[in-house]
Amino acid sequence: MARLAVGEALTNLVWAKVTSLADVKASGNWMYAAKLDGEGADMYDAAVAMADCMIELGIAIDGGKDSLSMAAQCDGELVKAPGNLVISAYVTCPDITLTVTPDLKLGKNGVLLHIDLAKGKRRLGGSALAQAFDQIGNDCPDIEDVPYLKKVFEGCSRVAQ
């Protein structure tokens, strides 16, 4: 989940002309029921996965906040929110007019590319799409190949210029 949060933050930046990937900084919003058994360990595991991913990408987290009371008692029953991490990434964008927007401008003359960051794995476990089709799914999405994500980000940045 933590690697996917980092990946999502970067794919949100990918089509803006940025100074460099190394200049990307991030803020992390941690939401866990940290006082409950196992939740602190899960949060630690997520922090390690996030840090390893960011180190491999050459980016850094420099702030954030936490919500560590993500559980409540209701009619004698404990209701716990699933642990979550939201990454907000930011970087200098020297020329905002060089940002690629998500609309098709060339009509039939354009080309639409799909860059498969999952490398063929169609993992939708726990997703809203799987739920819509009354499925649970076995495998959750993940970013397994961080160097590939870095190459894709840098390649798309060059194309966007």
Image: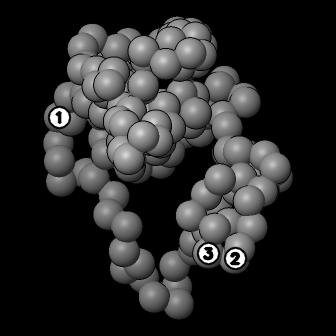
Q: From the viewer's perspective, tell me whether residue 124 is left or right of residue 104.
A: right
Residue type at numbered disc 3: Ala
Which residue does the image show at 57% across and 28% down from the upper left? 3
Foreground mark, 2 or 1?
A: 2
Q: CA distance from mark 3 to mark 1?
A: 41 Å
Q: Which residue is mark 1?
A: 94
Q: Which residue is mark 3?
A: 132
Which residue does the image show at 78% across and 46% down from the upper left? 139
Dot 2 and dot 1 residues touching (CB under 8 Å): no
Question: SS class of the residue under badge 2?
Answer: loop
Dot 3 and dot 2 residues touching (CB under 8 Å): yes
Question: Which quadrant, please, contains the N terminus?
Answer: top right
Which residue does the image show at 38% across and 12% down from the upper left? 60
Query: How far across and how far down the image is residue 153, in percent?
Result: 51, 37
Tell which of 22 and 46 is nearer to you. 46
Residue type at numbered disc 2: Phe
Tell me which label, 2 or 1, sits earlier in the chain.
Answer: 1
Tell me which label, 3 or 1, sits earlier in the chain.
Answer: 1
Q: Assess disc 2: are there few (<14), some (14-19) or many (≥20) residues with their C-alpha within 10 Å of its C-alpha.
A: few
Tell which of 28 and 19 is nearer to you. 28
Q: Assess disc 3: are there few (<14), some (14-19) or many (≥20) residues with their C-alpha within 10 Å of its C-alpha.
A: few
Mark sitting on residue 133? 2
Which residue does the image show at 30% across and 33% down from the upper left? 88
In the figure, residue 73 lies in which quadrant?
top left
Q: From the viewer's perspective, tell me whether residue 76 is left or right of residue 109.
A: left
